[in-house]
C-alpha cells in the first residue's frame, strides 16, 4: 500500500508505503477486511502527521479490481481479505466533506502518465501496467474513457493467441495470461529455467535474460511480442498517439521493448497506426498516486461519475 500528498501541479510532496498484510494479524487471528483497513488508515494518518496535517483538496485512490464503479466496492484479486469492501464509502467517512474518487489502479497509472508523464500534451494515450497482472486505461480526445462499467482500456484481456494459455478470467490466450510476471516465470520454468525453484520472480528472470540465459531471453521476447500485438490492435481501434508502459515487467528494458516494437511494426500496417510512440512510463512508482490525485485536481478530464 502506498500513499502520497500531491500538490495541485502534480508534484509529490510526501510519500510513504507499507507492505500489504497477507498473513495472520499480530494477535494470531486471520487477517480480515477491518484489519486491512486499519493498516491503510494508519498509513494515511502517519503520512499526514509527518507532513504537518496540511489542508486537503480531496482524496483520490487507485485499487486493483474487480470493483463496482463508481461506488468502489473493491475485490482485488491479490488481496483476498477484501471482497466487496466499500473502500470509497470508508474513505468518505474518514474524510467527511471532501471529494473522494476511486478508480482502478491501472487506470490511475494511465491518468498519471497522461497528466504529468510520458503522454503529457497528447490527446490520445494508452497507459499500461505489466506486472503481476496486465491492466490499462485509455485517454481519448484528452479525456479518460470509462466505458459502461469503468473498465475501458482493460488491455490485459485482449486475446493475443486464441490457442494460448488459460487465463484467470476464464478465457484463453489473453495478453495477461502470456505477459504477466508470474506467467512468464511459469513458462520459463516449463522450458528448463530454474526448474523446481520455488519463489523465483520476474525480476530474477529478467536478470538472467540480461546475462544471456536463452530461456530467459525467450520468455522476455514472448512477452514483448504479445504486448506488441495487443498494442497494434488497440492502436488501430483507438488511433493512439502514445502508449506508455510501466510495471515491474517493463523494467526489463530493451529485452522487452525490442521484441515489442518488432511485433508492433509487423502488425500495425495502417499509416496512422505506425505513428504511435511506445515508451516506458515516465513517473515510475508514483504514476498511480499522481493519477489518483488527478481524479481530484483535474476531474473535468478524468472523473465523470459525480
Image: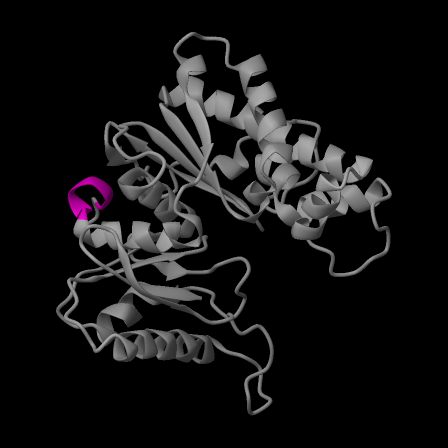
Q: In the displayed structure, would residue 4 be above or below residue 32?
A: above
**Residue drawn at point x = 15 percent, y = 62 percent:** 57
Please state the horizontal and vertical placement of residue 279, each as a whole percent of the image.
46, 32
**Residue, far bottom:** 27
Q: Is residue 257 left or right of residue 71?
A: right
**Residue drawn at point x = 48 percent, y = 59 percent:** 76
Please state the horizontal and vertical placement of residue 223, each as a whole percent of the image.
64, 34
Magenta span: 298-303
Residue 93 in magenta stretch? no
In the image, 183 versus 286, the foreground residue is: 286
Image quarter of residue 118:
top left
**Looking at the image, can residue 149 be seen?**
no
What kind of colouring is applied to the model shown? Answer: one colour
Q: In the displayed structure, would residue 197 be above or below residue 43?
A: above
**Residue drawn at point x = 58 percent, y = 13 percent:** 266
Q: Is residue 240 left or right of residue 207?
A: left
Please state the horizontal and vertical placement of residue 90, each as a whole percent of the image.
30, 71
In the image, 127 versus 29, the foreground residue is: 127
Which quadrant does the N terminus fall into?
bottom left
**Residue drawn at point x = 43 percent, y = 21 percent:** 235
Please state the horizontal and vertical placement of residue 239, each as a whole percent of the image.
36, 19
Predominant SS of the magenta segment: helix
Query: How many numbered marks are there?
Result: 0
Q: In this view, does 220 lie to the left or right of 237?
A: right
In the image, 286 versus 23, the foreground residue is: 286
Q: Is residue 297 left or right of residue 35?
A: left
Image quarter of residue 210:
top right
**Looking at the image, can residue 243 be seen?**
yes
Amino acid at each position: 500500500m502506498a500513499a502520497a500528498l500531491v500538490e495541485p501541479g502534480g508534484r509529490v510532496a510526501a510519500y510513504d508505503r507499507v507492505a500489504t498484510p497477507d498473513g495472520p494479524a499480530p494477535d494470531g487471528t486471520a487477517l480480515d477486511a477491518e484489519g486491512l483497513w486499519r493498516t491503510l488508515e494508519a498509513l494515511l494518518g502517519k503520512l499526514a502527521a509527518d507532513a504537518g496535517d496540511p489542508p486537503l483538496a480531496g482524496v483520490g485512490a487507485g485499487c486493483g479490481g474487480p470493483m463496482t464503479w463508481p461506488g468502489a466496492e473493491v475485490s482485488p484479486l491479490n488481496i483476498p481479505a477484501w471482497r466487496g469492501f466499500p473502500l470509497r464509502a470508508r474513505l468518505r467517512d474518514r474524510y467527511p466533506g471532501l471529494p473522494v474518487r476511486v478508480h482502478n489502479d491501472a487506470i490511475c497509472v494511465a491518468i498519471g502518465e497522461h497528466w504529468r508523464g510520458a503522454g503529457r500534451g497528447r490527446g490520445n494515450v494508452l497507459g499500461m501496467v505489466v506486472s503481476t497482472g496486465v491492466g490499462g486505461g485509455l485517454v481519448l480526445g484528452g479525456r479518460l474513457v470509462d466505458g459502461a462499467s469503468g473498465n475501458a482500456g482493460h488491455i490485459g484481456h485482449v486475446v493475443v493467441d486464441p490457442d494460448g494459455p488459460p487465463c484467470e478470467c476464464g478465457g484463453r490466450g489473453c495478453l495477461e495470461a502470456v505477459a504477466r510476471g508470474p506467467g512468464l516465470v511459469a513458462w520459463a520454468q516449463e522450458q528448463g529455467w530454474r526448474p523446481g525453484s520455488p519463489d523465483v520472480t520476474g525480476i530474477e528472470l529478467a536478470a538472467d535474460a540480461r546475462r544471456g540465459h536463452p530461456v530467459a531471453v525467450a520468455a522476455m521476447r514472448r512477452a514483448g511480442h504479445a504486448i506488441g500485438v495487443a498494442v497494434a490492435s488497440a492502436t488501430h481501434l483507438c488511433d493512439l498517439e502514445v502508449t506508455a508502459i510501466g510495471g515491474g515487467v517493463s523494467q526489463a528494458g530493451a529485452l522487452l521493448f525490442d521484441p515489442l516494437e518488432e511485433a508492433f511494426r509487423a502488425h500495425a500496417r495502417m499509416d496512422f497506426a505506425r505513428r504511435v510512440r511506445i515508451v516506458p512510463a515516465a513517473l515510475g512508482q508514483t504514476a498511480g498516486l499522481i493519477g489518483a490525485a488527478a481524479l481530484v485536481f483535474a476531474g473535468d478530464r478524468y472523473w465523470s461519475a459525480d
